[in-house]
Amino acid sequence: MSTEPSKQNLLAQILGKDPRYPVEAYHFVSQAVNLISREIMAKRKTASNRHITGLQLLNGMKQLLLGKYGCMAIDVLTAWNIYTTDDIGNIVFNLAEVQLLGTSENDRKEDFHNRFSFQDAFVNPFTPGKRIKPMPIIHP
C-alpha cells in the first residue's frame, strides 16, 4: 500500500489551511492546467517542456469557462469565490504547495495579479450592445 497522500487528502490539507475556495474550484483549475498544458505542448516543436505561464493559463481558462458555461461563467466563478485573476493564482499556488501542480523558479503569484477584468471577460460579451427599444404603448 502506498504511503503517498491521495489527491483527496492533499486537497483536504489545502482546504484546512485556506478555506476560501471550494474543492470544485481546485478540481477545475487542476484539470484546466492539464488540458491547457497539453494543448500548448502540442503546438510547440519540442514536447519536453510542459510548463505554461500564468497568462497562458488565465487565457486558456477564460476560453474553457466561456466554452463550458457561457453566460453563466461569472456565476460559476462567484459560486467558487473566484472574483479576480489573483484568486486563480492563489489556487494554483495552493495546489503547487502540496505538489499537485508544478511550478518553475520563475513563477510568482504576481504573474496572476489583475491580468484581466472578469466584467470584461465574462459579463460584457453577453450584454446587448444597443439599447432595446421599448414596446410602444397602445392607448384605447
Image: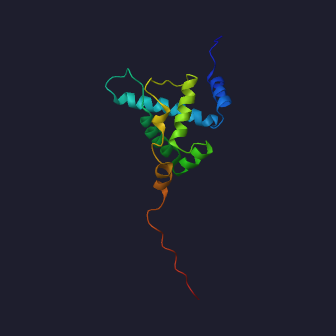
Image height of 65 relative to 43, above or below: below
User: In terms of depth relative to the viewer, which is nearer, 26 or 70?
Assistant: 26
For the point 42% across and 35% down, which residue is it?
A: 56
Residue lying farthest to the bottom in this orientation: 140
Quadrant where the C terminus sits is bottom right
Quadrant where the N terminus sits is top right
For the point 47% across and 68% down, which residue is it?
A: 131
Colouring rule applied to residues: rainbow
Q: In which quarter of the view is residue 20 placed? A: top right
State how many labels appear. Answer: 0
Percent coordinates x, y for residue 112 in the rendering? 48, 37
Q: In which quarter of the view is residue 130 placed? A: bottom left
Residue lying farthest to the left in this orientation: 45
Image height of 122 relative to 99, above or below: below
Q: Could you tell whether 95 is left or right of 113 in the image? A: right
Percent coordinates x, y for residue 45 in the rendering? 31, 25
Percent coordinates x, y for residue 32 in the rendering? 50, 34
Percent coordinates x, y for residue 51 in the rendering? 42, 26
Residue lying farthest to the right in this orientation: 16
Image height of 103 relative to 61, above or below: above
